[in-house]
Amino acid sequence: MNQALSHDAKQLTTKEIALDQLDKQLLNLLQHGLPVCENPFGDVAEQLNTNETTVLERLNSLLDSKVLSRFGPMFDAACLGGAFTLAALSVPEKRFDEVATIVNAFEQIAHNYQRNNKYNMWFVIGTESADEIDWVIKQIELQTGLPVLNTPKLEEFYVGLYLPV
Amino acid sequence: MLASTYPSKQKNMTSHNKALSEIERRYVLLTQQGLPIIAQPYHWLANELKVPVTDVLLMTKDLLDRGIIRRIAAVPNHYKLGYRFNGMTVWDIDDNQASKFGDAVGKLPFVSHCYLRPRHLPNWNYNLFAMVHGKSKEEIDLYRQQLNELLKGVLNTCDIKLNLNSNDMLISTKILKKTGLRLKK
């Protein structure tokens, strides 16, 4: 039964993946965190009434099928010594692709999303220093001819994503 | 086994010290792409760092306490789990109440990120950002309504002359680029 389901899962590359009960329990539990101890997956297995080998197999297969995009420590990027900001542009529809190419070409752009607003392009700039943020913004303004809306975080309340399955 | 040097070094550090020591920097470089899914991942790390595993466990707990590591966790691909919709909700709320209400918004289970950010009047009047995720447009609309319910007492009123609303939800229609933020060697 379980094998049939995980086999099906591999066929569905673009659609939602079929997960069995144990996959779901693992996903829900491990989004909250892995225990910090010598045999953390053994602890997880015990909590879910299964064994360590099964847990390791399932997790590796969830990673292989890209249900998990990563597994490991999630660092507060600001602690890693860089500078970050969220910025936006209001791009005329006709110029959208051209401007996206200009913005994405900067290695300092980590994410860039199109959004349904007057400000229709939102991107995260991550650099080694605060001065470099200013430089990237100036360059984008020069190359696109559009003013950048710069919204660095003033206060952070919560960062953590929990997607129950 | 190698002698432990880690706890003695840590004694001088306050719990809020965010600066990375040399070995912590190596810890980050080794794990920022992920931790291997093997029976003893911290032993693997101990071997790479050439320190005893007890040091790695202490260091990990300390990095968690200091907020440098948020969690050691599985990060699912939203789309594969059916979470196809993300909305960046933005709110124009009373500055004096912003910290208190930002905190309350951040505690809601469907909010993944919550920040206070600067306004840029007259073009951009929103100061509180909260990201929500859902499996349908209806689901994220409902989350926006719940946030509105929570914040309605502190929302600044719309300015019709400047065409400013008290809140909005910016739905992502396309990922244009997505790479991680990485510590460079």
Image: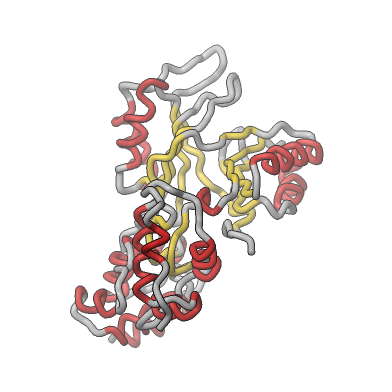
Q: Is residue B43 left or right of residue B178?
A: left
Asked if one can make out residue A107 in the rendered structure from this viewpoint, the answer is: yes
Towards the viewer: B28 or B112: B28
The picture places residue A98, in percent across and down from the top left corner, at 77, 47
Percent from the top left, x then y, of residue A146?
A: 74, 34
**Residue B113 x, y percent position in the rendering:** 42, 45
* Image point (45%, 35%), residue name: A155
Residue B161, position as x, y percentages in the image: 55, 12
- In depth, the one of B179 and B183 nearer the eye is B183
With B160 as the anchor, is A135 left or right in this view? right
| Most foreground residue, A114 or B5 | B5
Image quarter of the C terminus of chain B? bottom right
Task: Look at the picture and state if A68 lies above or below A111.
Answer: below
- The residue sitting at 39% across, 82% down in the picture is B38
Tell me what residue is drawn at x 44 percent, y 60 percent.
A74
Q: Is residue A8 visible?
A: no
- Residue B182's quadrant in the figure? bottom right
